[in-house]
Image (spheres, rainbow, N blue to C red):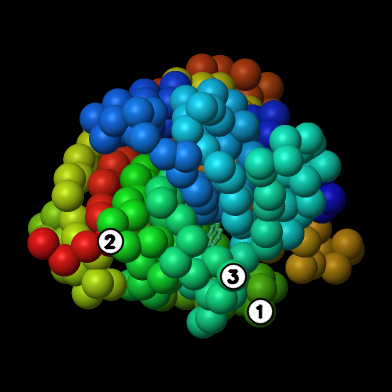
Amino acid sequence: MANRSLKYFHYGKYHLEKVGHEYANYIKSGNLLKNGPWSVMDIGCGSGRVLQEVLIPLLKPSISEIVGIDMDSNMIEFCRSKNQNPMVSFHTMNITDEKIPLYLQNRFDVLFSSYCFSHVRNLRLGFENCSKLLKKNGELFFIFQYKTHALYTTYKKMSGIYKWKLFTKEYNSFAPHFIGAEPEVELKSIIKDAGLTPLHHKFEPDFCIDLTKRQLLGIYESLDAKIDELPEDLQKDYRRDFLEIMSEVTNVDFVDQDSLDESIKFNVPTVCLHVKNIDL
Ligand SMILES: C[S@@+](CC[C@H](N)C(=O)[O-])C[C@H]1O[C@@H](n2cnc3c(N)ncnc32)[C@H](O)[C@@H]1O
């Protein structure tokens, strides 16, 4: 569906205040505006809204370039079509690719990422690649959801239905990040194994966003790249089952079309993470 990126651009603003607040605090605490100019990457940039509306206004005098990457080429094409800033470029890239292109290695002072690493299946590889992207003494500041993941849990349940098995089987053993009793220990161990040094983290299990059911559904539908893989004659049935299962997983009724404009509070357990590319 070619308009998924436009849909994400439209609905994907549930978190701009939170991300803006956390990024601003990080930038202030590290005196980022007094130094630089910095070479910056936004990992999993989606429709580019956070990059254009949060990162650039916060960092403006102190950046030499911002590179946005996303594994979804649909999102990257959309970002390119909207961008007019010569300091900004966009690349289709998966942060867990086996090989990071040489021209991107050892290039960045700061990596930012908002609500992407919850989708990254192999966190160890993801962070190892971050250490390759970063210059020595470079830093990353990430915000992502942990403990719950409605989209991939929906795929997991769909993988048990014969009709959808073929398309969703890679999720049949999916588990969200940090569901164990000691998420902090787990997180630090992954960071250290990637050759990075954890400086600060904050787990917020009760963080909630306020939005309508229509907005929440719009976000999940716009991130659902699976539907692009389906033959057109299966898409109607897929959407019906997707809505039913997503409702069960989130405990939010998306099937009743008449109630989609109801406002809800939706729990998005969130972790903020500050890491440096140096051995202490
Ligand atoms: C919830 S959206 C967040 C987009 C944007 N950062 C924001 O805050 O609005 C997650 C994005 O991460 C991208 N993504 C997920 N896994 C990725 C990976 N392994 N490598 C690169 N991008 C990824 C998805 O394609 C999607 O655009």
Compared with residue 80, is residue 175 higher up or lower down, i.e. above or below?
Answer: below
Q: Secondary structure at mark 3?
A: helix
Distance from Cα at disc 2 to Cα at disc 3: 18 Å
- Give coordinates of residue 128: x percent, y percent: 36, 72
Residue at horizontal 17 percent and vertical 45 percent from the top: 200
Q: Secondary structure at mark 1?
A: helix
**Mark 1–mark 3 CB contact (< 8 Å):** no
**Residue for point 47% across, 39% down:** 37
Q: Quadrant of the C terminus?
A: bottom left
Task: Quote the CA–CA distance across marks 1 and 2.
Answer: 40 Å
Number of other residues with Cα within 10 Å of mark 2, as a class: few under 14, some 14 to 19, many 20 or more: many
Q: Amino acid at mark 2?
A: Asn
For residue 181, which numbered disc appears in the image? none
The residue where tag 2 is placed is 277
Residue 170 at x, y percent in the picture: 53, 77
**Mark 1 vs mark 3: in front:** 3
Residue identified by numbered label 1: 166
Q: Could you tell me the amino acid type at mark 3? A: Tyr
Q: For the point 41% across and 70% down, which residue is it?
A: 132
Let me know if residue 90 appears in the view.
yes
Q: Residues within 10 Å of mark 1 (few under 14, many from 20)?
A: few
Residue at 50% in and 48% down = 39
Nearer to us in this view, 167 or 27? 27
Image-quadrant location for residue 17: top left
The mark that comes first in sequence, 1 or 2, is 1
Identify the residue under disc 3. 103
Asked if residue 183 shows in the view, the reply is: no
